[in-house]
Image (cartoon, rainbow, N blue to C red):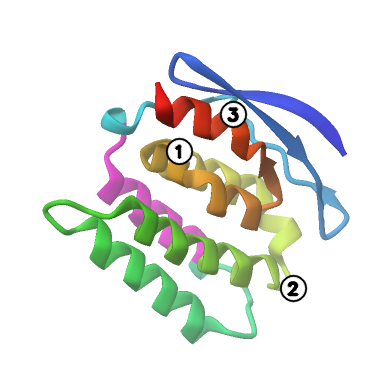
């Protein structure tokens, strides 16, 4: 496991990268976008298409988790905690897909704007993707 830093807007967040299906899950982008800079509808559409290419044993559960996240995001005042929980479930199911390792680069690319939009609520999703974020640093960012 190696330590790296990802910048969230003006903040740097420490992360540890771990192995996923014998391949390193490494984001190509070192900077997550600011939440207000993300077109979350577009990001979710692109993420859904990428996740749809996986051969998972639980496609219905994956679709349900994505639909729950989309429903929350479409609300006038979305609860980012709820959206993050649904997206974390989707990420966990996706990691179980037999072809996850072949798609991990595009999935990290598609998850990046979503993680930016979630801001400090992205912890659950990052953990599910094996991007283990130091929760203390995110809590510091949330308090600023």
Secondary structure beneath disc 2?
A: loop
Viewer-nearest of discs 1 and 2: 1
Percent coordinates x, y for residue 140 in the rendering? 51, 26
Percent coordinates x, y for residue 65 in the rendering? 43, 73
Q: Is residue 129 above or below residue 86?
A: above
Along the line of sight, the residue nearer the viewer: 55 or 27 = 27
Along the line of sight, the residue nearer the viewer: 103 or 58 = 58
Q: Residue at x 67, y 23 (%)?
A: 5
Q: Residue at x 26, y 62 (%)?
A: 72
Name the residue beneath numbered marker 2: 98
Percent coordinates x, y for residue 143 in the rendering? 41, 27
Magenta segment: does it hold 42? yes
Q: Is the residue marked by circle 1 packed among few (<14), some (14-19), or many (20+) residues within 10 Å?
A: many
Which disc, if any, is residue 137? Answer: 3
Percent coordinates x, y for residue 14 in the rendering? 67, 27
Magenta segment: does it hold 2? no
Quadrant, the N terminus: top right
Name the residue beneath numbered marker 1: 120
Secondary structure beneath disc 3?
A: helix
Q: Earlier in the sequence, mark 1 or mark 2?
A: 2
Q: Would residue 105 be found to the left or right of residue 109 on screen?
A: right
Q: Which residues are magenta?
A: 38-51
Q: Is the residue marked by circle 2 packed among few (<14), some (14-19), or many (20+) residues within 10 Å?
A: few
Q: Earlier in the sequence, mark 1 or mark 3?
A: 1
């Amino acid at each position: 496991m190696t330590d790296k830093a990802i910048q969230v807007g003006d903040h740097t967040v420490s992360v540890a990268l771990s192995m996923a299906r014998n391949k390193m899950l490494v984001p190509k982008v070192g900077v997550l976008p600011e939440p207000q800079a993300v077109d979350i509808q577009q990001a979710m559409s692109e993420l859904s298409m990428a996740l749809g290419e996986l051969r998972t044993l639980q496609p219905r559960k994956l679709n349900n988790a994505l639909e729950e996240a989309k429903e929350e995001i479409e609300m006038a005042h979305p609860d980012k905690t709820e959206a993050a929980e649904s997206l974390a479930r989707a990420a966990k199911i996706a990691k179980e897909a037999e072809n996850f390792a072949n798609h991990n680069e595009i999935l990290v690319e598609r998850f990046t704007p979503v993680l930016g939009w979630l801001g400090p609520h992205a912890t659950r999703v990052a953990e599910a993707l094996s991007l283990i974020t130091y929760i203390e640093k995110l809590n510091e960012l949330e308090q600023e």
